[in-house]
Image (tube, rainbow, N blue to C red):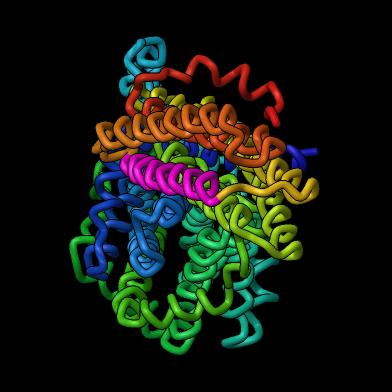
Amino acid sequence: MDVLYTVLTVIGSLGFFIFGMKIMSEGIQKVAGEQLRTILSAATSNRVAGVFTGFLTTSIIQSSSATTVMVVSFVNAKLLSLRQAIGVIMGANIGTTMTAFLLMFFAFGKFSIADYSYPIMAFGVPMLFLSNQRIKSLGEFLIGFAILFLGLDALKHSMSFIKDNPEFLELIVKPLSEFGYLSVILFVLIGGLLTVVVQSSSAAMAITITLCGSGGLPLEYGAAIVLGENIGTTVTANLAAMIGNVHAKRAARAHLFFNIIGVIWMLFVFGLFVDMAQYIVDNTVFDGLTSLKPIDPTGKGGLNLAAEGAARVLEENTLKIRWSLAVFHLCFNIVNTLLLVWFVNKLESTVVRMVKVKAGSDEEYHLEFIGGGVMSTAELSIMQAQKELERFGGIVHRMNGFLQRMLDSTGKKERKKLGKKLEKYEDITDKIEMEIIEYLGKAAQLPMGKDVSKKMGAVLAVASDLESIGDIYFQLSKVLDKKASEKLWFSPAQRNSLHELLNKVNEAFDVMNKNIRSMFSGKYDVKSAYQVEHQINEIRNKIREWHFESLEKEEYNINSTVVYSNLYSGLEKVGDHVLNVTESLTGNVDAYEQMRPMATSPSTN
């Protein structure tokens, strides 16, 4: 029973730690959402800038996984190239080493922040009830910070049985340490497995630091476990990316290759790096961090001098081993980055060759920018949805070209092929709209400011208009099918007028797609949008007037009248929806309140 209680206590303490890490990381991301976006956007093709950006971002939010999620979101949104993203991921690997130093300073060193966790929570909890979203998020961060160190303190105490029963750890370590250099590889595998099991490299690092020390896990095996943790954290990302899009897969694969290559070369110089870490701790400022208070010569401490001296030496050695582990982790990631940062281009080309985009992506429906559950903040989610709108706008724009070719087509086979293509694209528009609604329905659960809420409403309204445009083009293709099946014909004047209208609608699409791309810059071309829509109406009115006059004069085939009328009327409706897109983007239409009914009602066809 005691063994079961101890195991459950360790698991519960670990869960407490991971929960605190999650709350703290999410809180700081919400507080600094816009700033983090600015920091990540600042990453350029300069590799050093990318590495520094990844290091800084991960150091702030204390989660390399969260940094990777944001990097993938920015790659999806085309704010970062894959090459830039790889540099940021390299920097994130260095940034995640700060977690070990944070733990050593505030949990395993002379000063324990766990003693102040409850006062920190006393400040954080009232913030949750304030209306200011940023202050509420700061309260979440403080509560998560306090819970993290309470969980770590609980983990230390729950694992004290190893210190009291050294034979327990020896029972595990001794059989694995009898294989010479192969033992190091075995502990690397253990580190990878540990990280996959706990789903957090920070939690795995906390466990490793807790196990290391005098009478505990030797430094060389702790260092080997740390190497395995570097691989384990990328396995988690790759498993998540399996259901993601091509960008998520490439970024996760690059992270995996980067860390595996690093571990491979490190195994050749493993002993040298372990000795170097110990040397740094023994001969630099770290040596002062391992020195404890002097022995009490009066014996008032309750122990005799010999016993207190032995305990002091044991504790100092434990601190040195733990600090050496943190320094080893830092040195490995810095050197690995310095070595491989020059091969970013090669790493990029490798993952691009391995993870290829399927040919004919428009013909085979899938969302390109939304996928894999990559959703860290509401703003990043809107950015990805906006990039999906860009692609959506391109799809309906191409439908205008298909209809124009179908109008000119004289061959039955070609006309049938274009009709099938328009039908396929109409089905794609239905699915994209519903996927965007579903995605933003989830994003709506995330905290967001008023500006992000307006953008969400704009995205939903635009998606609805683009889907309606797809419906119109599909119906117009049916009208042309009817024309062909009934062997109706258009006069040259009719055909020319329709081409004039189609060309003007094409101009409207150009303006619309330019405005969709400007969603986050706010530089909309509203004047051109209204001008081209007005011109479409003028052409429609001119066609209709001429149409009725020609009917009275019986200048062309009376049987084509309905077909002709449906075509120019439908194209004018397309122009209306195209203008609606710009109006939604500029805020003339507030569709945010319509989100919930849209999310529950089926798309109209």
Front-most of 540 and 354?
Answer: 540
> The C terminus is located in which quarter?
top right
Q: Is residue 353 magenta?
A: no
Viewer-side residue, 138 vs 112? 138
Please, what is the dominant secondary structure of the magenta stretch?
Answer: helix
145 to 419, vertically: above or below: above
Indicate whether 83 appears above or below 79: below
Q: Residue furthest front?
A: 553
Q: Is residue 311 visible?
A: no
- Quadrant in the rendering for residue 327: bottom left
Numbered range of the magenta stretch:
492-518
In the foreground, 124 or 132:
132
Whether residue 513 appears in magenta in the rendering, the answer is yes
The N terminus sits in image quarter:
top right
Q: Position of residue 269 (x, y in %)?
A: 41, 87
Residue appearing at x 61%, y 80% in the figure: 183
Q: Residue at x 25, y 49 (%)?
A: 39
Camera-nearest residue between 165 and 303: 165
In this rendering, does residue 534 appear at all? yes
- The percent position of residue 38, horizontal first and vertical second, equals 25, 45
Residue 603, placed above or below residue 122: below
Q: How many marks on residues?
A: 0
Instruction: Note whether 451 is above or below 243 in the view shown.
Output: above
- The residue depicted at 32 percent of the width and 23 percent of the height is 134
Name the residue at 50% across, 29% down.
544
On screen, residue 252 versus residue 149, left or right, reads right
Q: Position of residue 301 (x, y in %)?
A: 33, 38
Query: In the image, residue 421 lies at what x, y percent?
Result: 68, 55
